[in-house]
Structure formats: structure tokens, C-alpha cells
Amino acid sequence: NAGVTQTPKFQVLKTGQSMTLQCAQDMNHNSMYWYRQDPGMGLRLIYYSASEGTTDKGEVPNGYNVSRLNKREFSLRLESAAPSQTSVYFCASRDRGVTGELFFGEGSRLTVL
Amino acid sequence: AQSVTQPDIHITVSEGASLELRCNYSYGATPYLFWYVQSPGQGLQLLLKYFSGDTLVQGIKGFEAEFKRSQSSFNLRKPSVHWSDAAEYFCAVYNDMRFGAGTRLTVKP
């Protein structure tokens, strides 16, 4: 069982470059999320998609865009990377049932020089 | 403002000692609460969750947590810590999937 798969796992960018983080889940979950993790700040929600065809901003959406390509895939795009976006990014998914548990990918470490 | 707070950034305990990690929340209604664990270089794994009912919930790896409405707390406990418990622990709220800043646990031999 793959669960939640993120690519790439590591990426180094120069300031101003663009890139897309890909996320796919094989659990038929309705909701998908993108978080960033920074030391001392926990996980902060960037964007989420409650269901296919919808996306909403989280706590820290500035500088990011997302696309819910289909039920399985949810991508995060940095149009013009900045050093402040150096972070570890996590994708997660869940079924919007009573349990509500999030299932996480292994993370993508992004460095912006 | 809605928030979830973990007051302890870093805790060190000896192997075999008991453990309590604190989590406080500020939400209008009773939130649904989770504890997650993150081992170094890994994603997050669910330890336990509270939605309703019994305020003492059991989780995996011998962890438990107690929901106390009067104190707006959901503290994580373990009677005897193992070296493999060294990790970062996050409290989270279901309502808006907001996470606390995390508590890093170091286990001394």
C-alpha cells in the first residue's frame, strides 16, 4: 500500500525559479492538504482541498498555488521561489468521515538559495 | 483566536521514566483532538484521537491521553518511556487541522 506519495523528496532552487510539488494518494480520500514544517513552528496549513474540484487557503498561502487535478492528485506550485520558502513540505489526505485521521506523505525538503 | 499550544519545546526523560506532554487548545466548541508522532526524517503517524465519550483514550505504542474540558487540555502520557520513543510529538485539532508547534522528546539511557 503506497498511501500518500510525494515527489520530489529533495529539491534545491534559486530565488525566482518555479517548481511544482506533486502528491498522489491511493486511498480514495476526498480531502487533501499541503503543510509546511519549520523548526519551532510545527506544521502550518498552506492550502487544502475538501473535495475534488475545490481548493481553499490555509494559514500561510502567500507565494503558493495549488491544483486538485483529480481525486488522487493535489499539486503545490511555487511560481517564484523565495528563501523564506525553504522548508519541509508535507502532503496529507483523509476521508471526511468521523475518524478524520490525516495520512501523511514522507515529506519534500526544499531549499531556496 | 483559535489555537493549539504545546508549551514545552523540548523534554528530556530517562528511559523507563514516565512522560507527560502538554497540549492546550482555545476553541469555542469542544474540538476533536489528535496526537501525532514524527520520527526523524519521517512523516507523521497518528498516536491517538479524541472525538467524544470517555475522556481517557488509549493509543498505539502504549500512549494514552486525557481530555480535560475544564482545563482546555489534552495531555499525552506514557508510564514508561523507551529509547525508541525519541521523536517529535504534535497535538492537532480536527476542526481546522491546526497543529501545535511540537515537543521534541529526548530519551536518556
Image (cartoon, rainbow, N blue to C red):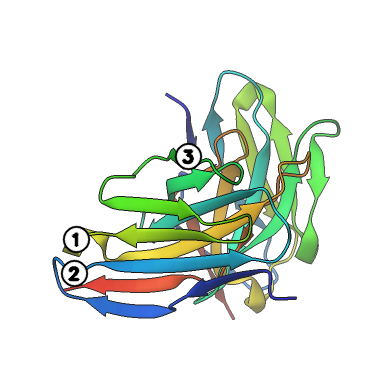
Horizontally, residue A10 falls left or right of residue A101, namely left
Residue in the image at 68% along x and 24% along y = B69
| Circle 3 residue | B5
Residue in the image at 79% along x and 55% along y = B59
Horizontally, residue B9 falls left or right of residue A68, namely left
Q: Position of residue B66 (x, y in %)?
A: 73, 40
Q: Compared to B93, does A92 lie above or below?
A: below
Cα gap from disc 2 to disc 3, whole angstroms: 35 Å
Which secondary structure lies at badge 1?
A: loop
Do the residues indicated by labels 1 and 2 lie within the same chain of the protein?
yes
**In front: label 1 or label 3:** 1
The residue under label 1 is which amino acid type? Ser
| Circle 2 residue | A17
Which secondary structure lies at badge 2?
A: loop
- Quarter that holds the N terminus of chain B: top left
Q: Position of residue B13 (x, y in %)?
A: 57, 66
The residue under label 2 is which amino acid type? Gln
Of residues A63 and B2, the one nearer the viewer is A63
Horizontally, residue A109 falls left or right of residue B75, namely left
Q: Compared to B11, does A106 lie above or below?
A: below
Residue in the image at 50% along x and 45% along y = A48
Cα gap from disc 1 to disc 3, whole angstroms: 32 Å
Proximity of marks 1 and 2: CB atoms separated by less than 8 Å: yes
| Circle 1 residue | A80
